[in-house]
Image (cartoon, rainbow, N blue to C red):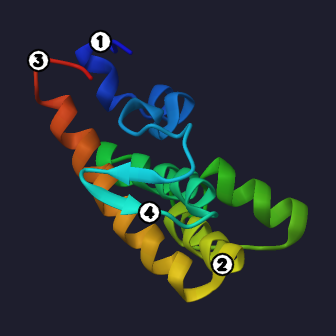
Amino acid sequence: MQVPLGHYSDPLLLESFGPSLFVDMSGERIEIQGEVYPQSWAGGVAMLAWMGAVCEATGVHCGSGDYFVMERCAIDGHCAASRQELMRDDAMNHAGEEAVKVYDAMRTQFVNLIRTRGRTSSAP
């Protein structure tokens, strides 16, 4: 998929593309920068990590006023201080401590990928 260079800094566009910009999400396992995640729940955690990474990588403030955070607080009473905290909590609920570790690793990888692609002249 070709993405114009400037769009790697557009948080809404990045959210809509999802991690498929950098990761093949179609198989039974997920691989990010050579790191393989074979867990059956890795795809769901990858989506959570992506949503947290977009804020961090683009510098957008995703605190308690973030639309995801406000919506979850209003709908199901799960109120968090930031989108990253909310997504991390969701990973914990998804598959426990192992999922949180995977979430943290994936989020870091996605932040690096978004930032790196934003400074290069070629898209994946």
Q: Which is nearer the N-term, disc 1 or disc 4?
A: 1
At label 2, counting other C-alpha atoms closer than 10 Å, the crowd grade (few under 14, some 14-19, many 20 or more) is some
- Determine the residue positioned at 35% across, 54% down: 56
Check disc 3 and report its element: helix, strand or loop: loop
Quarter of the image where one finds residue 90: bottom right
Circles 2 and 1 in contact, beta carbons < 8 Å:
no
What whole-number distance in Å separates the C-alpha atoms at marks 3 and 1? 9 Å
Q: Is residue 120 above or below residue 41?
A: above
Give, as a three-letter code, the residue at label 4: Tyr
- The x and y percentages for residue 106 are 39, 61
Residue at mark 4 to residue at mark 2: CA–CA distance:
14 Å
Q: Secondary structure at mark 1?
A: loop
Q: Quadrant of residue 42?
A: bottom right
As measured in the structure, the alpha-carbon distance from the residue carrying label 2 to the one carrying label 3 is 38 Å
* CB within 8 Å, label 2 to label 3: no
Find disc 1 in the rendering and name its residue: 4
CA gap, disc 2 and disc 1 = 36 Å
| Residue 4 seen anywhere in this rendered image of the structure | yes
Secondary structure beneath disc 2? helix
Residue under label 3, please give it.
121
Q: Amino acid at mark 2?
A: Ala
Amino acid tagged 3: Ser
Q: Residues within 10 Å of mark 4 (few under 14, many from 20)?
A: some
* Mark 3 or 1, nearer chain start: 1
Gap in angstroms between the C-alphas marked 1 and 4:
29 Å
Which comes sooner in the sequence, label 2 or label 1? 1
Q: Which residue is mark 2?
A: 95
